[in-house]
Amino acid sequence: MPLVSIPANPVPDNGETGTIVTPDGVSLRYARWAPPPDCKGTVCVIQGRTEYIEKYFETVRDLHARGFAVATFDWRGQGGSQRLLPSSPLKGYVRHFDDYQIDLETFIQQVVLPDCPPPFFGLAHSMGGMAVVRWVKSGAQWFERIVVSSPMLGLSNVPMPRLSRALIRTMRLAGLGGAYVPRRDASVLATAPFRNNPLTSDPVRYARNAAVIEADPSLLLGNPTVAWLDEAFKAIAETEDPVYPASIRQPLLMIAAGADKVVSTAAIERFASYLRTGSHLMIPGARHELLMEQDRFRAQFWAAFDAFIPGTPPSW
C-alpha cells in the first residue's frame, strides 16, 4: 500500500515504502527515509494503537533535520498492514501482545539492519511504548537508547479496574474476543470533532490527521476488541511488579503528558522510578499525543529528546 500524500501532509522526500512478512505470515507495511549528510544513525518510530505511517511525516522531517535517518512500520491489524479480522477490518484486535514483538523483530531484521545506518535508536508512543518495553525486557538489544512518549503502562479511562479486568477476561473465555469492548462501537476517535478530544490541544494537527483519514479511509481503525483489551490488561499487570522495570538494562527516557486522559501518568512515574538505566519527565498541560501537540509542548519534548539521543557513544 503506497503512502498517502495530501497538501497538508506531503510525503517527506527520499523515502521508500514496501511490505515485509512476519514468520507467522502477517504482511506489514513499512517506510524508511535515506540518511541526511553527517548522519547520526537511524531512529525507528514505533507507533501507538490506531496509528499509521502518514501520521508521522512531520516527525520524520523533525528527525531528519536533527541528522537521523528514519524507519517505521504499521503494526499488524492497523494502518496499511494486514488486518487481522478481514470481515471486520475496523476492529482493533490482536491475538497476543507477544505478536507485536514478532512485528518489531521482523521490522528490525528485514528493514533496519540491512538498509539503515547504525547506530539505532527507538522513538515509541503509547501502545508502541508498551511493546518496546516488553521487547527489551525479553532481551532485545538492537537500540542504543529509547525515548518513549506516553507509554501505555496503565489506562486512565477504565472504571473499577479489577472488575473490568475480570469482566473482559470472562468475555474472552466465553468466545467474545472479537467483539467490541462493552459500550463501544465502530465509531472512531480520529474522525470525531476536535472539541474535548483527549489526544491533542492543537486543532491544526488534529485536522491534518483527520484529513489523511478522509483521503484514505482504509487507514482507519476503530475501538478495541475484548481480546485486545484483555491482552493490554495482562501486559500492564506484568509491568506493575517492581522487579520488571528494575531488570531492564536498556537506557530509557519516558516522557509523560501531564493532562493525559488515555494512559496513566502515575503508572509511568511509578515504573520509571524502578528503572536502573532510565529516567522520567512530565510535560505539564500536554495531552496524550505529545508529537501531535502544540509547538510549546513539542518544543519541550524535542529538548528532552535532543539531550538524550544520540547520547554518549558506547565505550567499547
Image (tube, rainbow, N blue to C red):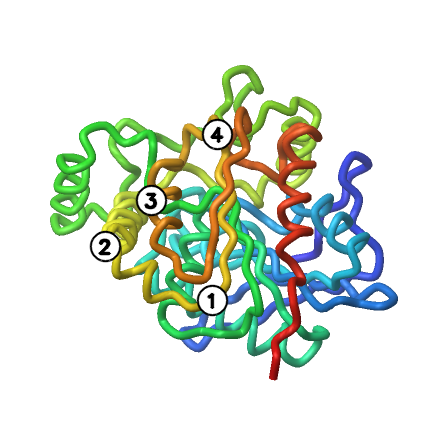
Q: Quadrant of the N terminus?
A: bottom right
Of discs 4 and 3, which sits in the foreground? 3
Report helix, strand or loop for mark 3.
helix
- Badge 1 element: loop
Figure quadrant of residue 98: bottom left
**Marks 3 and 4: in contact by CB < 8 Å?**
no
Q: CA distance from mark 4 to mark 3?
A: 14 Å
Q: Name the residue at 25% across, 32% down.
A: 182
Amino acid tagged 2? Asp
Q: Nearer the viewer, residue 204 or 240?
A: 240
Furthest toward the front, the residue is 315
| Dot 1 or dot 3, earlier in sequence | 1
Q: Residues within 10 Å of mark 4 (few under 14, many from 20)?
A: some
Pick whichever, 258 or 156, lies toward us.
258
**Residue that carries the numbered disc 4 in the rendered image:** 258
Residue pointed to by mark 3: 270
Q: Percent x, y for residue 76?
A: 47, 58
Residue occupying the point 62% across, 55% down: 308
